[in-house]
Image: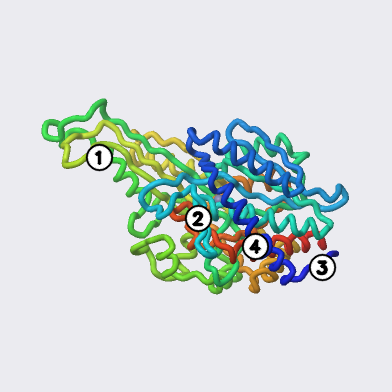
Amino acid sequence: MPGFSREDLLSHARAKRPEFEAILKKIVEIPSVSVEPNRKGEVHRAAEYAVSLLQSFGAKATLYETKGHPIVYGRFDRGPDYPTVTVYNHLDVQPAEGPDWNTEPFSFIREGDVYRGRGTTDDKGPAMTALFGARYAFEQKIPLNIHFLWELEEEIGSPSFETTIRANAKEFATDSVVVSDTVWVSRARPACPAGLRGLQGFRFELQTGETDQHSGTAGGAARNPVTELCQLIADCVDGKTGRVRIPGFYKDVAPPTKKELEDLKRCGFTVKDFKKDHLFRSLRVDDAMEVMKRIWMMPTFEVHGIAGGYQGPGVKTIIPPKATAIVSCRLVPKMSAAKVVKLVKAFVKDKNPDVKVSAEHELPPYEGKTTGPYADAIRGAMKFAFGKEPVFVREGGSIGAVLSMEKVLKTPVFFLGLSLPEHGYHAPNENYDWPQAEGGIAAFADYFRRLAEM
Ligand SMILES: [Zn+2]
């Protein structure tokens, strides 16, 4: 087994820093916003660039067209007798506009060690970091095939991902997957998710008339769909505490284990930083443990928007004919999305039978492994690169592709995330930084070596 020390790797990373920055600049400046139809060409251009990049690194690379945006598959092949690891990242990004951006979102800006621009941390920076680590490990001739699965529809819920990997399951066959698309709890200590919350979206619609009516002539007798939806939502969830009032909603929620609680205690989470990173003025609770349990281990019922009625200046005294609410539930391991749909539909029917409920986007929750040789390799690689073992925590968000890969490729999925809370996932002024990239290159190279040794 080829040996490389932490110092070898870090000096290699430092030598490659200008190349890393040039490549990150190039890919960040392609505005691959998957949700915006007028950016379809740009998303495709990002995929084409990714193929040429992989090829320039000496990997084989293929662009797979799908019904939506393409998927890029790359491979550093050592040979069929060696194990294979597949690195998953996504190269599409969230929309970015608005007055809160201090710099042009699709201009790559370097300020010392900080790299600014949409996609720098979610997920182009970590993708490039993994690629640099893989190239080093491959050049050191470690006996391992390293493949890349780069998606361009992650931010829209991966609608084409599962069908594409299913259609190419033979080509994409692998012994394990490592995902780099998650956030540490704080810079002080690496963190790996051991579970992801799932999601079940809903649309509530209520129509009680045909056109706006005068609240003076009809008000009092006319039904008001906005008011009724507000009442329905208040029946579903306590707005102040967040407690979901739908009977049976919490039935399958498993309480955290002792080990999980221990990891939470030493993960470096503080309420102060959480508030600062997310620009919150206040929270529902102020106890750190309680906040962590709520964002990682408990399901939620959230209203994303209510539409209906007059929104302009002044007061226009109408009674609107219809109203819509977009809501969703975050789900935790052991909860079933189908069961939640049933519960919500039955509850709404009971409270207000005129409200039409449609179940929208669904992602099951994911429960990861924290023991065994792969989890130990993650622990070892993080310690090698960053000097500290990671804590295994949960992630509040959902990554649909994770479940698809586990199911279709029949392979375990692990996480080696590099983003930090202050990097601003999905937020204005998104950024990534060189210390995470440099450590990340070392962590990936070392992880690949550990897999080859397994
Ligand atoms: Zn992401």
Which is more N-terminal, label 1 or label 3? 3
Mark 2 lies within 8 Å of ligand 1 (Cβ measured): no
- Looking at the image, residue 348 sits to the left or right of residue 1; the answer is left
Q: In the image, what residue type sits under mark 3?
A: Gly
Which is more N-terminal, label 2 or label 4? 2
Where residue 449 sits in the image (x, y, percent)? Answer: 78, 62
Q: CA distance from mark 4 to mark 3?
A: 18 Å
Secondary structure beneath dot 2 equals strand
Q: CA distance from mark 4 to mark 2?
A: 20 Å
The residue identified by callout 1 is 311
Q: Nearer the viewer, residue 180 or 133?
A: 133
Residue 377 quadrant:
bottom right
Where residue 316 sits in the image (x, y, percent)? Answer: 17, 37
The residue identified by callout 4 is 440
Q: Nearer the viewer, residue 252 or 7?
A: 7
- Rendered-image quadrant of the C terminus: bottom right
Where residue 260 sits in the image (x, y, percent)? Answer: 58, 67
The residue identified by callout 3 is 3
Q: Is residue 251 visible?
A: no
Nearer the observer: mark 1 or 2; the answer is: 2
Q: Nearer the viewer, residue 58 or 184?
A: 58
Q: Nearer the viewer, residue 346 or 242?
A: 242
The residue identified by callout 2 is 109
Q: Is residue 199 visible?
A: yes
| Number of residues whose C-alpha sits closer than 10 Å to that of mark 3, classed few (under 14), some (14–19) or many (20 or more) | few
- Looking at the image, residue 204 sits to the left or right of residue 167; the answer is left
Q: In the image, what residue type sits under mark 1?
A: Gln
Structure colour scheme: rainbow
| Number of residues whose C-alpha sits closer than 10 Å to that of mark 2, classed few (under 14), some (14–19) or many (20 or more) | some
